[in-house]
Amino acid sequence: MRLDVVIVTYRSATYLPVCLEALSNDAHVVVVENASGDDAPELAETAGAKVVRNATNRGFAAAANQGASMGSGEVVLFLNPDAVVGEADLSKLVTTLESDEELAAVGPRLVSPDGVEQRPWWAFPSPSSTWLEALGLHRVRRWAEADGQGFVVGACMLVRRSALDEVDGFDERFWLYGEEADLCRRLWGAGWTVRLVSEATALHIGGASGETVSDVTFEHFQRGAEHFIAKHHGRWGLLSHRLGLLVGSALRLPVLVLRGDRRAALRRKMVVRLLRQLASHPFEVARP
């Protein structure tokens, strides 16, 4: 299969050279730079990649579609600039996709530089799963997820182009976070399947593009989940999701404060945000 690689960068120049170095010289690599103002474009061109310089930050989904449209390979690897996948592991992903005509997308195991396993596969967000998590009913949640449908993390995701085209690529209303969950949900809905390939591994630092904008990253992460819920579960589902998050955060916050746990600040931020959302626009996701 002919391979295209799409890497969307934003303040990622520190990590990009290692990411590019691990890729095969045969791959058609497109780096889409989302107006971060660093030297990632020059680094990418030096490595032989085709570079797109956006005048504004278009968000991940739009930039990923932009990069994918510039290739014609049968498979497209969407790769974060802070992720590294070697030729052998990438070959395992390609072989898996080739071996099953119903497979639309696959992803590898993700490991941080210190060897800690990251979670590479998630069940789809839903109001019910939000409430189960809020109430600490983890075993019930695992039972509820037993149908096996879910999504691979977009840090390293190989997608069959015909499947990508069938569902019209990423939904560009997702600016940052949630876009890979939405893509995989639509692929399942179109009759395709998505799989984790545990035999393949990618190194992933995680959060590199958002290190200097943590408050913005937090907000967009929440918006990504809310866009997914609103799109696939409707306005009442969005309200239920927000109420579940509020209850879960409120229940955990006093315990975290008493323990002196640094996660208390995040829970407090979550409570404040949710109260504002519920007071001003409980049934919709406001624009940034």
Image: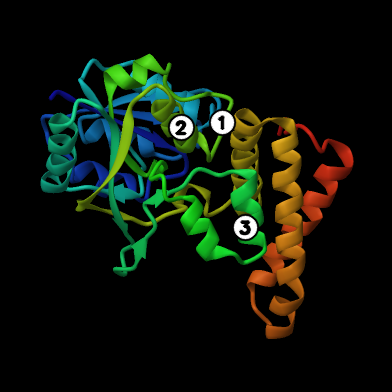
Of the numbered discs 2 and 1, the one sitting upstream in the chain is: 1
16 relative to 4 in the view: left or right? right
Q: Distance between the residues labelled 1 and 3?
A: 25 Å
Q: Is residue 137 above or below residue 256?
A: above
Q: Which of marks 1 and 3 is in front?
A: 3
Q: In which quarter of the image is the N terminus?
A: top left
Q: Which of marks 2 and 1 is in front?
A: 2
Q: What element carries label 1?
A: loop
In the foreground, 26 or 129:
129
Q: How far apart are marks 2 and 3 (CA)?
A: 21 Å
In the foreground, 256 or 25:
256
Mark sitting on residue 174: 1
Q: Which of marks 2 and 3 is in front?
A: 3
In this figure, which residue is indicated by the disc labeled 3?
132
Residue at position x 76%, y 56% in the image: 246
Q: What element carries label 3?
A: helix
Q: Identify the image's colour scheme: rainbow, by chain, secondary structure or one colour.
A: rainbow
- Name the residue type under label 3: Leu
Q: Is mark 2 on a helix, strand or loop?
A: helix
Residue 73 point in image, percent of width and height = 20, 20
Residue 160 point in image, percent of width and height = 26, 25
- Name the residue type under label 1: Phe
Q: Quadrant of the C terminus?
A: top right
In this figure, which residue is indicated by the disc labeled 2?
185
Question: Badge 2: few (under 14), some or many (20 or more) residues near its Cα, within 10 Å?
Answer: many
